[in-house]
Every structure is written in structure tokens, then in C-alpha cells.
Amino acid sequence: MTQAQAIEGYFDYNATTPVSEAAAQAMSAALRLFANPSGRTAPSTSNRELIQNAKQRVAHLLGTEPAHVFFTSGGSESNNWAIKGSLLNDLPRAGHILTTALEHPSVLETIRYCARQFGFEVTCLNPDASGAVSVDAVAVAIRPDTRLISMMYANNETGVIQPVEQVAKLARKRGIAFHVDAVQAVGKRALDVELLGADFVSFSAHKFYGPKGIGGLYVRNVERLSPLIHGGGQEMAMRSGTENLVAIAGLGAAADECYRELAAWDQHSLACKQRLIERLNDADIQTCINGASAYEAAISNTLNLSIPGIRGEALAVLMERKEGMVVSIGSACSNNKTKQLSPVLLAMGLDEERIQSAIRISFGRFTRLEDIDRFAASLERRVKQLQAMGFSG
């Protein structure tokens, strides 16, 4: 299978995106820049300028200033840093953390760690059937000792957008630190972090056509955050260590490209989503959309589907092996001893059968409308094959 064919059959953009040509070229050029950016030589100065240029491009994309942008190894590190760095900045005052059942493991596991190690109490809110947590539920759950609210912008499984703007206002009014995991939103929807009003916003380059292993954290006020790594003083002494110049160059190029093309990419993804829904409605199979799918309620590139009577993992395997098309399953792989169901779909109140029949379809800038047509036809063909085989949950 060629690279072009692989991209044509790729419907797992929420897991990671193909690296754009602009990002690849920037990284290739940076491979030859060997000087340590912390040095005092002319080549070092040039490399520091590259880092600042990349930071400026990222800041442009996020609607902020470069001084508020800190590079990390990706979304998981950014989430860990925002949570630990905020809470441990004033450790003797433990208190309460408010989050949701929709969060990425790098958020939930970090919060569990802080609760276990330092005595924080945690409230974890469930969404409604649409996949969104209500603002009223957040308001009711806030306590006088709430130290941190952590909520994702858009869910990685369903694409449903959470009410982060309204929650930000609640948090600011009560003086509570607010962290937004925007890993699935940056590069898919326009996001102005200054207007959003959050204290910390996480993002990751490989979700918007940049390289893996690089991301960042927007920090409104560094005084509210403890340093992540102590040492040589890089990143304003907040994350010391010699910078990953190659990855930063790729991130900067991806951010610049995204800033210029985001509106067009978003509309293209919306057209793909609408086309897929139309084709599925015309198909001779039954499908159910999990979570909200309207433009204002969910990011444009994601659709979570359940096909009654069909195991999602069996369908995903068949789609890849027989059709060359990659999707993600809605529930974790299970074995004979354990059965793991998607915590997100469980929290939405879906029953076990529907969760086990779920698949996530996500696409992006390289997906063509004709790829959507082929995907819908392939899905119908393989669902019917599984039905004929009696392959149900």
C-alpha cells in the first residue's frame, strides 16, 4: 500500500494526523542546526530565533502572546503540568478538584494521583445523553474549597464540545484555576485563549499535522504554576532542558499553516461529515450516532457510530484488513477475562451492547469526498458480511 492509499483509507485523525509537507520540510531543515540554543555563539543565537519564531506562530494560532506559550512533549505532559503545577503550587491548602468523566486519562489519572498522594477531594461530573456536561451541574458542584476545574474542550471519542466558555466565567468569578484540555480542538476550531479566559490550555502538534512528541501549554499567569523541570532555565525557567529544535520547527510550521487554513479545513471536514451522514442514511444498514453531531455542538471531523448487533472491534479489523480503511473502536479491546467499555460512552448512559458496537470515524484535510463515499460503501458491505456470519455481540 502506498502512502497516498494509506491516507485515502485513513479515518482515525483524532488519534493522530499525517505530518504536513510544510512541517516535514521545516523539520528536515532543522536537522542540520546543531548548535545549542542556550549557547552564546552566532549559530546558537540563530537557533534561539527559530524557537521564538515558532512560539510566535503558535501564539498567533491561539490568540495570545509568545510569553504565555510553553513547549512540552505533547498533550499528556501539558495536562500533567497544568494540574500538578497548579495544585502543588500551594500544597498545604489541599481542597477540592472538579472534573468530568469525559477527560483523557492524562487528566483523570493525574487528578487521581493528586487525590491519593496529597488528600484532594474530587468530583467527577457525568455528561447528559448528548455527551456534554451542563454548566448548571458545574455550578452546583463548585465548593468553597474548589482549587481547580479541569474540562476538555472537545471529546476525543464523540467530538462533542463542552461549555468551556461558560465554565471559565464561573471559575474566574470565584477565583478558581481553570484548565482546558484543548488537544482535540486546536487545529479544528478557531480558539482564542485570551477570550476563553482559562488559566491553562493544553495542545499537541500531532493533532494538527505537526510532529509527534511536541506540544504546549498556554499559561495565563506563571505565578499560578510551579515549574515542571528545574535546571538550566529554559522556557523562562518553567521547563528546563535543551529544546527539541527539530520538533519545535515542525510545530511552528504546522501552527502557521493551521492559522492560515483553519477555516477552510473546518468547512471541508463539515462537508465530509454531512456527506457521511447522508450516505449512511441511504445505506441498507442501521446506524446510531452517539452524542451530538450538529456544527455548534461538536467538532466537524468526528462521528461516533453504533451499528446494532455488530461488534465494533470486529468491524474495525475487517475494515482495515479487507478495505484498507482505518477507524477506531468505541470500546477498548477486550479479552476472555476482562471486558472494558468506553468510560465516555458509559458516562453518557449508553447500554453495553451499544457501546460494544461503537466505532469512531474521524477525518481531516487530506480526506476527499470520494473517500467518504468509498468508506460508506465499504462499511455497508462489511456490516452485511458480519451480519451474514452472525457475528454479533
Image (cartoon, rainbow, N blue to C red):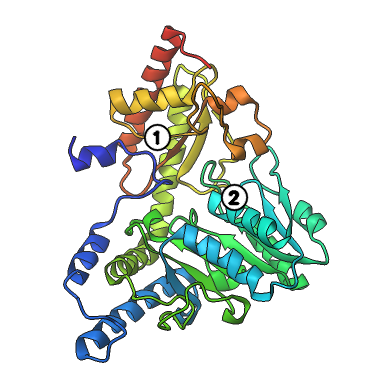
Q: Residues within 10 Å of mark 1 (few under 14, many from 20)?
A: many
Q: Is residue 341 left or right of residue 263?
A: right
Q: Nearer the viewer, residue 83 or 299?
A: 83
The picture places residue 154, in percent across and down from the top left corner, at 55, 51
Q: Nearer the viewer, mark 2 or mark 1?
A: 2
Q: Is residue 12 left or right of residue 32?
A: right
Q: Please, what secondary structure does the residue beneath circle 2 have?
A: loop
Image vertical order of residue 113 relative to residue 276, above or below: below
Please tell me the numbered disc located at residue 103.
2
Q: Kindly give the residue lying farthest to the front in the view shown.
A: 117
The residue sitting at 23% across, 67% down in the picture is: 26
Image vertical order of residue 298 relative to residue 316, above or below: below
Q: Please, what secondary structure does the residue beneath circle 1 have?
A: loop
Q: Is residue 250 left or right of residue 117?
A: left
Q: Nearer the viewer, residue 280 or 249?
A: 249
In which quadrant of the rendered view does residue 201 lie?
bottom right
Q: Nearer the viewer, residue 270 or 206?
A: 206
Residue flagged by tag 2: what amino acid is it? Glu
Q: Residues within 10 Å of mark 2 (few under 14, many from 20)?
A: many
Residue flagged by tag 1: what amino acid is it? Val
Q: Is residue 134 visible?
A: no
Q: Nearer the viewer, residue 61 or 35?
A: 35
Residue highlighted by disc 1: 327
The picture places residue 229, in percent across and down from the top left corner, at 47, 73
The residue sitting at 45% across, 23% down in the picture is: 282
The picture places residue 21, in percent across and down from the top left corner, at 23, 58
